[in-house]
Amino acid sequence: MKVVKFGGSSVASATQFEKVAKIVLADPERKAVIVSAPGKRFKEDIKTTDLLITLANSVNENGYDQDALTAVLNRYKEVIEELSLDRQLLTEIEGNIKESISLYRRDYERLLDALKASGENNNAKVMTAYFNALGHKAAYISPKEAGMLVTDEPGNAQILPEAYENIAKLRERDGLLVIPGFFGYSHQGHIVTFPRGGSDITGSIIAAGLDATEYENFTDVDSIYCVNPTLVDKPHELKELTYREMRELSYSGFSVFHDEALQPVFQKGIPVCVKNTNHPEAPGTRIVLERQINDQPVVGIASDNGFCSVNITKYLMNRELGFGRRLLEILEDEHISYEHTPSGIDNMSIIVRSHQLYNGKEERVLDRIRQELLVDDVYIERDLAMIMVVGEGMKHTVGIASKATQALAKSGANIKMINQGSSEVSMMFGVDGATVDQAVKCLYYAYFVD
Amino acid sequence: MKVVKFGGSSVASATQFEKVAKIVLADPERKAVIVSAPGKRFKEDIKTTDLLITLANSVNENGYDQDALTAVLNRYKEVIEELSLDRQLLTEIEGNIKESISLYRRDYERLLDALKASGENNNAKVMTAYFNALGHKAAYISPKEAGMLVTDEPGNAQILPEAYENIAKLRERDGLLVIPGFFGYSHQGHIVTFPRGGSDITGSIIAAGLDATEYENFTDVDSIYCVNPTLVDKPHELKELTYREMRELSYSGFSVFHDEALQPVFQKGIPVCVKNTNHPEAPGTRIVLERQINDQPVVGIASDNGFCSVNITKYLMNRELGFGRRLLEILEDEHISYEHTPSGIDNMSIIVRSHQLYNGKEERVLDRIRQELLVDDVYIERDLAMIMVVGEGMKHTVGIASKATQALAKSGANIKMINQGSSEVSMMFGVDGATVDQAVKCLYYAYFVD
């Protein structure tokens, strides 16, 4: 039993609906279909979710902007007409949206959640109608019916443990199950949306709840690449990578998933397959718990700019029990999350994303470190880039670091930081922001071309 | 004005006393002489301090072991006779020791401190008599007279801030000042010894208090070497290194100083010169605050065995604010000090000295990490060795890491951990204990021979 999720661009038009149906019906294992809101049909197009936010913002004591509602309805109308579905469906969608406006007109946060969720919700209804029109047994399952119980904070739903037991009962249902992504229901009876990567989270929860054999995530790329495809022409496609590798690569927005989306399937060890709705023959990328290590110890290279390091020196620092803990306490107290803490004997660097140290906060943090930890020196180094060289096979291969450092030397990048833990799934290098792209290219050629 | 300290082997016999006097009198800048207790004269010899501990252990209600006292006195007797000093001195030494026994016979800890301290104290008196016999103005200055006020915990003296003001007044004294190392006086009037590296600490405090231009530390090696001389034949001698470099090299017991000994001179920026009593013409090694960086970016390679790493994995660890702080809190709570914490996105290794994780404690720490931090996995990897490649010049040199990792690959060592912070005074490599010696040799050849 597979759970299949389709992203916004995969369900943006009638043509895309046809592709989706073809994909779903090609494999009888595909049981549950998670549907996003209609995304962009072309580069300048506006996503339905954004149209719904505009509509929500237009709601006031006197009503709402009729044009904003029409813009939303037109997205469904186009699909319904082109697929020759029952036009009564559009009337139902309009009724559903107006009902949400009427119910929550005085509570903006709830209104926003209900309208945003309607994008996925109504699209799932259209998808169900299309499967039925094609003569296939399919049922729209609302998150309420599925028992997707979540916490009640608007825009920040967290799944509740009992939801999984409810979802498991759907296994007994006949035919296809079409479920809207992006939201659940709270015990208080409200629609609440997930924080980010919403439909991915729904798919992951449904796959975990149904104990699926695979979670297929259809989007608009053939696979995850071993390096950012804007830096390197036609980079190597990844056939398989582990969850740990995927996480290490996520530094660069490289991963197609939001961080938290895959946690439910990770915990059950369910494989995830990233595939392309527009090119379903491509094998895609499988994300698994464990994989066979082949000759290629490195699977990918991720990089990102916008880091800085807080560099601290204090004579006899490493003899001072509690120094590191007190330093991290100051950061936590100032709501700063850190990435790594490479250290020497009497010095320590804290690598953080620069946006966390804006004016004022930067000075306060430095002052606190000076005064509370009595350090000899503390300063901030800005415009750092981080490079992650990732691969489970690195653990057992002599010479991996040597290849990386040679490639970096060749690129002219001065290595400012190196960090590699005993788990050895990744090696991190800190370099000047200006040198990072060339550095990544040289690493790519060293590991994947030469 | 220079402060000169002589280690135990430098003041172990009459011949050594003659060398010391020659050295001190060769430079009129040498003002204060810090004297250790007589050390070993030959490999199987017993240090006077150890003879004194035996004497202290023999003290009971009925008296003490006369042979143990004679063994101590014989060390001074030999020197006094060979240098033709006044034999009355030996009677004074005997009286001094007996007085301590009588005073502290019911308080073992105080007795031990007083007897241990007498080793240095009486040797300083003999040294003063020798300078005087040679016709030079020299005065024995007891730590009490010098105002070396310390905290009152036996065997763990910490200098009190007011001591420096007292010591500064010694600048006005004429002639040589001969001061015993290893102990101070508490406000309660007790003799209290320093924890470890005792005479080095005294010399460092006196140099700081007198605001000396240099602190000369005479021992029995020509210099600090760039690598452990038991691993490599005749390694490169270090002419100059910074305090930071010296600290990074101290990993391997490579440094001739105990960690805390140099803090007083470091804080005043006073240069330290390590020299050989048996070969004073050799230039020795100078330890300074800042040095001119030459063509050689790496100054030394230190290594040590006996480490282990606690390896922790948790999905989404790096999104969890406070994770690192809570982990370090558990370690602090269990009185475990750590060396480094290299990390990936969702994994973190804590490198500690293995002796801290003995049976029972190991399991408790792992259990606490599992239960309090809800990690996916935690395990301990033993028999790790750490290698530090050290040098201030590394900061501005492209390709340093490349040279190191190539040398390690050549040696056949698999790099398990790498840690280099933004300060870039050092690069740390973690390797299997069995491969470390070969790895250090290959690094030495890469940086200092090829």
Image: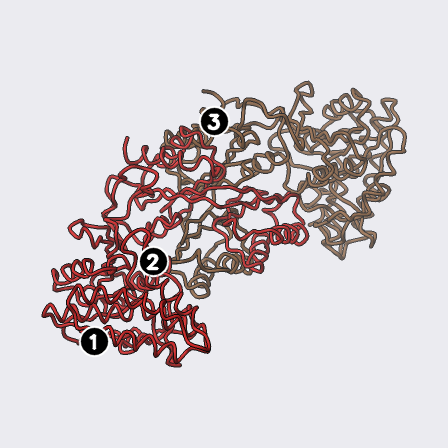
Chain colours: A brown, B red
Per the image, label 3 sits on a secondary structure element best described as helix
Image quadrant holding the N terminus of chain A, namely top right
Foreground label between 3 and 1? 1
The amino acid pointed to by label 1 is Gln
Q: Chain of mark 3?
A: A
Mark sitting on residue A444: 3
> Count the marks: how many?
3
Residue found at x 63% / y 32%: A242
Q: Which residue is mark 1?
A: B88
Q: Give the spatial CA distance, label 2 vs label 1.
A: 25 Å
Q: Secondary structure at mark 2?
A: loop
Where is residue B414? Give x, y as percent.
48, 33
Q: Residues within 10 Å of mark 1 (few under 14, many from 20)?
A: few
Q: Position of residue A213 (x, y in %)?
A: 77, 29
Query: Looking at this rendering, what residue extends furthest in the top direction?
Result: A281
Q: Can you identify the residue that label 2 sits on?
A: B46
Residue at the left extreme? B135
Quadrant location of the C terminus of chain A in the rendered image: top left
